[in-house]
Amino acid sequence: MKNFSIRIKVRYCETDQMGLVHHGSYVNYFEEARIAWISNLGLSYSEMEKSGIILPVSKLNVSYLKPAHFDDNLVVNVELDEIPTSRLIFNYTIKNNDEVVVTGNTVLAFLNKETNKPVRCPDYMLEKVTPLFS
C-alpha cells in the first residue's frame, strides 16, 4: 500500500518544558512510520542494511501547524511519493484526532554501505512498490 498509518501515544519524554511535543520528536515519528511502512510491504530494513544498502536521509522538511501534548494519541500517515530510483521520497501527515498537527517529507538516498556511493533501488523493493502506482 502506498499509504500506511501508525498510531503513537505521546510519551512524557517526548515533550519539552512547555508541555508540547518537542519538535525533534516528530522526526522520530516519521522514521517509525517509514520503517513500519517498509515492514508492511514484507521487507526488512535490517536485512537491506545487511545486504549492503543503507538509506540515509538526505532532505527533511517539517511544517509544525498545531501543538500536540503528552498522552495525545497521534496518527502518523506515511505515503510513498513516487516510484523509487536512487532515492525514496515520503510524505507525512500527523493528526491529533482529526486535526493535522504536522506535515513533512523526507528524501532518502540508496547508498552502497561500503563505498557510500549512490545505487539504484533494489529490484526486490521495486517489485513491491511499482504496482502501487498502477
Image (spheres, grey):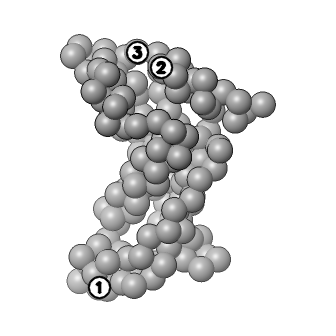
The three-letter code of the residue at mark 3 reads Val
Element type at mark 1: loop
In this rendering, the answer to whether 5 lies above or below 124 is: below
Q: Residues within 10 Å of mark 3 (few under 14, many from 20)?
A: some
The three-letter code of the residue at mark 2 reads Pro
The three-letter code of the residue at mark 1 reads Met
| Residue occupied by mark 1 | 18
Instruction: Residue at 65% x, 44% y: name it.
Output: 1
| Residue occupied by mark 3 | 119
Q: Residues within 10 Å of mark 1 (few under 14, many from 20)?
A: few
Q: Residues within 10 Å of mark 2 (few under 14, many from 20)?
A: some
Instruction: Residue at 50% x, 32% y: name it.
Output: 88
Marks 1,3: beta carbons within 8 A: no
The numbered disc on residue 122 is: 2
For the residues labelled 1 and 3, the Cα–Cα distance comes to: 43 Å
Q: Quadrant of the C terminus?
A: top right
User: Where residue 26 sits in the image (x, y, percent)?
Assistant: 39, 62
